[in-house]
Image (tube, rainbow, N blue to C red):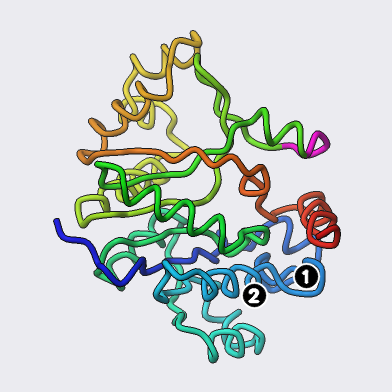
Amino acid sequence: MSRNENGYACVVLAGERPGGSAFSRELGLAASVLVDVAGKSSLQRVINTLESSPSVTGGVLCGPAKAVYDTSPEIGTLLEGSSFKWMPPQTGPSASAVAGIEKLDRFPILLTAGDHALLTPEIVEDFCSRAALQEADVVFGLAPYALVREAFPESKRTVLRFSDGAWCGTNLFAILTREGKAGPVYWTSLEADRKRPWRMARKIGPVLILKFFLGRLTLDSVLEALSRAMGCRVGCVIIDNPRVAVDVDSVADRDLAEKILLAE
């Protein structure tokens, strides 16, 4: 499968579940991506970073909802001077990712989130360049939990613990080929069954789940299992920058992000 020599198209996920998030309600915001982080909204910081990244050639902002888009002048103003176009979100992040990928219909595609306020062009360039070197269809970024904990000991992060290490997600995904769309399609099916854990377990595989709880899963074995389940080649990039693990979806995360940005 040939790849776009002009760089990555990008899907920025900025939707919320029906009723909004607890974070946006707590701050009285129309959408959580509009939270002010050291003088700029989270969404503005993400779009500015992507516009400053040579590997990114524009793309789509999937969300916030149309009602928010129509009543929040900031979003229109931000996109007016950018290479990104707004599109309505779907019922969940994975479904929105699939819709964005189908809208762009060119590869490779970078997938990230509108609350990734600490994202930098350097991180984007590092991830995109190393992802492109992999023999994979879809690649995701991971940050070593030890680095994240050392840098931000007060921050609570979701941790993926395997027998050969512990990792935090980074909200960075590369869909390198058309076959790689199978990745978010697969996660969409898991999201649909989030209230039916027995169905999720069946799709993930009982042996994989058992090994996880027994602490016998390695990162490589997870990649192999995901490749089989998704029907495409799955890879990952380890990002040794702890800030990549911080998304802004709580007041505590906003305060941490501001502390980091104001110290620069």
| Quadrant hosting residue 114 | bottom right
Query: What residue sits 50% from the left and 11% below the top?
Result: 215
Q: Residues within 10 Å of mark 2 (few under 14, many from 20)?
A: many
**Is 63 left or right of 235, judged from the image as shown?**
right
Please tell me the numbered disc located at residue 36. 1
Residue wearing tag 2: 44
Check disc 2 and give the amino acid type.
Answer: Gln
Locate residue 47, reporting x and y percent: 57, 73
Residues 6 and 50: in front is 6
Q: Residues within 10 Å of mark 1 (few under 14, many from 20)?
A: some
**Is 217 left or right of 160, judged from the image as shown?**
left
Q: Which residues are magenta?
A: 152-156
Query: What residue sits 63% from the left and 71% below the top?
Result: 43
Magenta span: chief secondary structure:
loop
**Is 256 left or right of 194, judged from the image as shown?**
right
Eyeballing the image, is 145 above or below 24?
A: above
**Is 139 left or right of 83, judged from the image as shown?**
left
If you read the primary sequence from the N terminus, does the residue marked by circle 2 or circle 1 appear first?
A: 1
Determine the CA span between mark 2 and mark 1: 9 Å
| Residue 112 lies in the magenta-colored region | no
